[in-house]
Amino acid sequence: MRVVVFQGQYGIFKREDLDLSMPAVQTCLGLYALSDQHDYLLCAHFDTGLGLQQNLEDIQCALTRKGIGMKSLHGVVFGGDGKQSYLRCSTPSSDIGHAIVNFIKTRGGIAEYSSQYYSGLISKTFNFYYKRRYGITEGQNPRDFIGYHRQAEYIAKQRIKLTPREYSPAQAKMTDISNLYY
């Protein structure tokens, strides 16, 4: 099953036969988390700190509906901007990444923020991929965008009509795209 997770979206997917990419994590933040007790992968593509707590609680509820507890997760947050790039970019930043990590840890999961993958002074783009193996690649590869669901694309296009600093709380709400991909 091919899945593409755009900014402002998250999903929980069975790992068996999964071919996933989460492209263009630049000033955005990516989260991937593997469940130790289940064959699932959580991916979330954050583009704002507005409504962060509610978005994280929504993700936790989506996990619970699938029978997955936060305690079984091992997650990595990557992307965002390092402190030295605040002049170029506004949030999301490493501060938001650390807030995501703390949310997972206070609920018993394991999480870390990878400072290896952030945009820094010169803009960098990262892609998380999963296909039997997983990792993060730098740069833009057109293949990362192939195979997306049309509804996921539509949701993303509606979201990027505004910059994150223009979002209202309702516009900052992330969308669960798990059910778009079977």
Image (cartoon, rainbow, N blue to C red):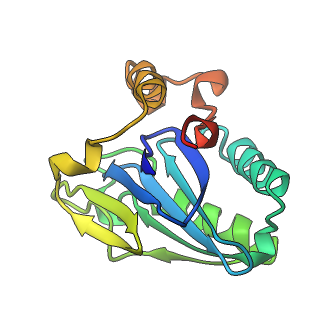
- In this rendering, the answer to whether 47 lies above or below 102 is above
Query: Image check: 121 left or right of 108?
Result: left
> Residue 153 placed where, x, y %?
40, 28
Q: Nearer the viewer, residue 158 or 142?
A: 142
Q: Which of 64 and 96 is in front in this view?
A: 64
Q: Which of 61 and 89 is in front in this view?
A: 61
> Residue 122 placed where, x, y %?
15, 58
For image coordinates 76% across by 56% down, the residue present is 63
> Residue 48 placed where, x, y %?
51, 41
Query: Image check: 159 left or right of 147?
Result: right
Q: In which quarter of the image is the C terminus?
A: top right
- In this rendering, the answer to whether 76 lies above or below 96 is below
For image coordinates 72% across by 64% down, the residue present is 103
Query: Image check: 144 left or right of 139?
Result: right
For image coordinates 69% across by 81% down, the residue present is 36
- In this rendering, the answer to whether 106 lies above or below 14 is below
* Residue 181 quadrant: top right
- In this rendering, the answer to whether 162 lies above or below 18 is above
Q: Which of 73 and 179 is in front in this view?
A: 179
- Disc tally is 0
* Residue 147 quadrant: top left
> Residue 179 placed where, x, y %?
63, 38
